[in-house]
Amino acid sequence: MATVYREIPVEAAAQDVWAALRDPGNVDRVFAGVLTGARMENDIRWVTFADGTVIEERVIGVDDTHMRIAYTVGGGRFEHHHATLQVMPDSTDSLRHCRVVWISDFKPDERIQMVEPLTDAGCAALRRNLARR
C-alpha cells in the first residue's frame, strides 16, 4: 500500500480552516484551481478536476472534536483509497496559524504517480485559498 503524507502550513486560525474543510460540499472552493466543481448526495460527493475528470468519493466521517474529515475514493481507479484531512492548531499561535495533515493510503502502489502531483497541487490550492486575507 502506498501512502502520501503532507503537512500544509496555513496562515489562518485553525477554527476558520476547519469551518471550510468540515463542509464536504465546499471542497471545490477549498481546492479552487485544482477542482472546478463538487456535488453532494447523502454521503457521496462527486468532484470535478480542472481537466474535466470526475471522481466519486464517499465521505466516511466529519469529526468536529478532532477537526478531521475522512473519505474514500470509488469508481474503480483504485483497489483501495482512504484519505483524511485533519486541522492541527499551532501550539504557539492558533489564532493565526495552523497546519493541515493530509494522509492518503491507496492500492495499487503505482497510482502514486497520479496521486502525489494532485496532492501537491491540492496542498498549494488549500494554502492559497484558506489563508487569512
Image (cartoon, rainbow, N blue to C red):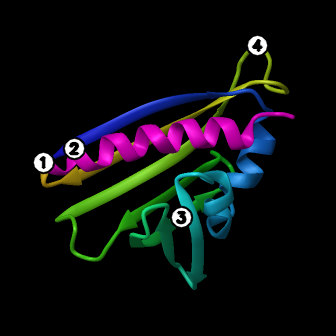
Q: Which residue is mark 2?
A: 113
Question: Is residue 113 placed above or below 132 in the rendered structure?
Answer: below
* Cα–Cα span, label 1 and label 3: 27 Å
Q: Position of residue 61 (x, y in %)?
A: 53, 64
Q: Position of residue 62 (x, y in %)?
A: 60, 61
Say whether disc 3 or disc 4 marks the residue closer to the N-terminus: 3
Identify which amino acid the numbered label 4 is placed on: Thr
The secondary element bearing badge 3 is classed as: strand
Q: Which residue is mark 1?
A: 110
Identify which amino acid the numbered label 1 is placed on: Glu
Question: Is residue 112 placed above or below 64 in the rendered structure?
Answer: above
* Cα–Cα span, label 4 and label 1: 39 Å
Q: Which residue is mark 4?
A: 92
The answer to whether the residues at label 1 and label 2 have Cβ atoms under 8 Å apart is yes
Q: Which residue is mark 3?
A: 61
Q: Which residue is located at x 55 percent, y 36 percent?
A: 124
In the rendered structure, does residue 115 fall within the stretch colored magenta? yes
The answer to whether the residues at label 3 and label 2 have Cβ atoms under 8 Å apart is no
Say whether disc 1 or disc 3 marks the residue closer to the N-terminus: 3
Looking at the rendered image, the disc whose residue lies closer to the viewer, 4 or 2, is 2
